[in-house]
């Protein structure tokens, strides 16, 4: 059963375990407002159909291969998701099915012995497999993400560890956090 981290009238903030389907863990009568890929654990929001909270921000943490030239930056791409292969690809021009994708990243630390970077990410857009695709296309596949080129054998090293929401315009924002190292340690 999903762990409820916070709740209010008509909504719940839930911790999704690795391997769970976001849509299937939402309590009966609620809809998922922020989903995560099945292999990715983290915080999601669910609300009753008559009650909408606004998810205003999410922060992800990941472990990826390689050292970054810049300690922080922005990644912008045009992404196409192929539903038949369930893979997302960067493309060079806009066409049917292509969406703009943008994220900001900050390198927290680098392990030279393992050639791994620990990174925080904030999405400006939420595209299917966006983080996984954008990092892999820059030769920084996420540890454990064989679908996008990693050769490291471990669970996909990505977690949504912070979610910020409010109950509508003019209400105070609330941030719910978990410790990303619970999922990323040992890689």
Image (cartoon, rainbow, N blue to C red):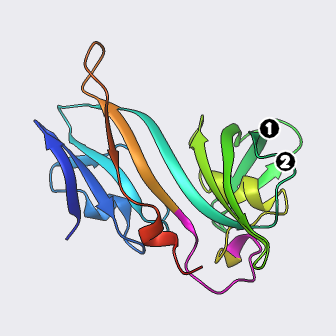
Residue of label 1: 95
Q: Residue at x 64, y 78 (%)?
A: 144
Q: Residue at x 22, y 41 (%)?
A: 47
Give the image location of residue 136, x and y in percent.
77, 62
Give the image location of residue 85, x and y in percent.
67, 69
Instruction: Work out how far the residue at label 2 is from the one at label 1, CA to CA, in angstroms.
Output: 9 Å
Query: Label 1 near label 2: C-beta < 8 Å?
Result: yes
Above-or-below relation of 128 to 142? above
Assign a secondary structure to mark 2: strand
Give the image location of residue 75, x and y in percent.
76, 41
Above-or-below relation of 1 to 76? below
Of badges 2 and 1, nearer the viewer stands: 2
Q: In the visual, does 185 lie left or right of 175?
A: right
Above-or-below relation of 114 to 160? below
- The residue most toward the left is 9
| Image disc number at residue 131 | none
Is residue 110 visible in this depiction of the protein?
A: yes
Give the image location of residue 70, x and y in percent.
83, 46
Query: Looking at this view, is 53 or 67 the one in front?
Result: 67
Q: What segment carries the magenta color? A: 147-158
Q: Main secondary structure of the magenta part?
A: loop
Is residue 39 visible in this depiction of the protein?
A: no
Q: Residue at x 76, y 39 (%)?
A: 73
Q: Residue at x 78, y 41 (%)?
A: 77
In the rendered image, the quadrant that contains the C terminus is bottom right
| Image disc number at residue 91 | 2
Q: In the visual, does 129 lie left or right of 78?
A: left
Q: How many numbered markers are drawn? A: 2
């Amino acid at each position: 059963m999903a762990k409820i981290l916070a709740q209010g009238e008509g909504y719940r903030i839930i911790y999704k375990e690795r391997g769970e389907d976001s849509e299937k863990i939402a309590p009966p009568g609620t809809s998922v407002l922020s989903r995560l890929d099945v292999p990715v654990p983290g915080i999601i929001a669910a609300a009753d159909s008559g009650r909408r909270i606004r998810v205003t921000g999410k922060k992800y943490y990941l472990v990826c291969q390689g050292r970054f030239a810049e300690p922080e930056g922005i990644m912008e791409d045009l992404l196409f998701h192929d539903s038949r292969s369930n893979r997302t690809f960067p493309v060079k021009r806009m066409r049917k099915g292509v969406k703009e994708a943008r994220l900001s990243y900050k390198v927290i630390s680098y392990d030279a012995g393992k050639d791994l970077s620990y990174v925080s990410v904030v999405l400006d857009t939420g595209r299917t497999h966006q983080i996984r695709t954008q990092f892999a296309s820059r030769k920084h596949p996420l540890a454990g993400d064989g679908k996008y080129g990693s050769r490291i054998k471990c669970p996909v090293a990505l977690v949504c560890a912070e979610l910020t929401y409010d109950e509508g315009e003019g209400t105070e924002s609330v941030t719910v956090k978990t410790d990303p190292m619970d999922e990323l340690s040992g890689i």
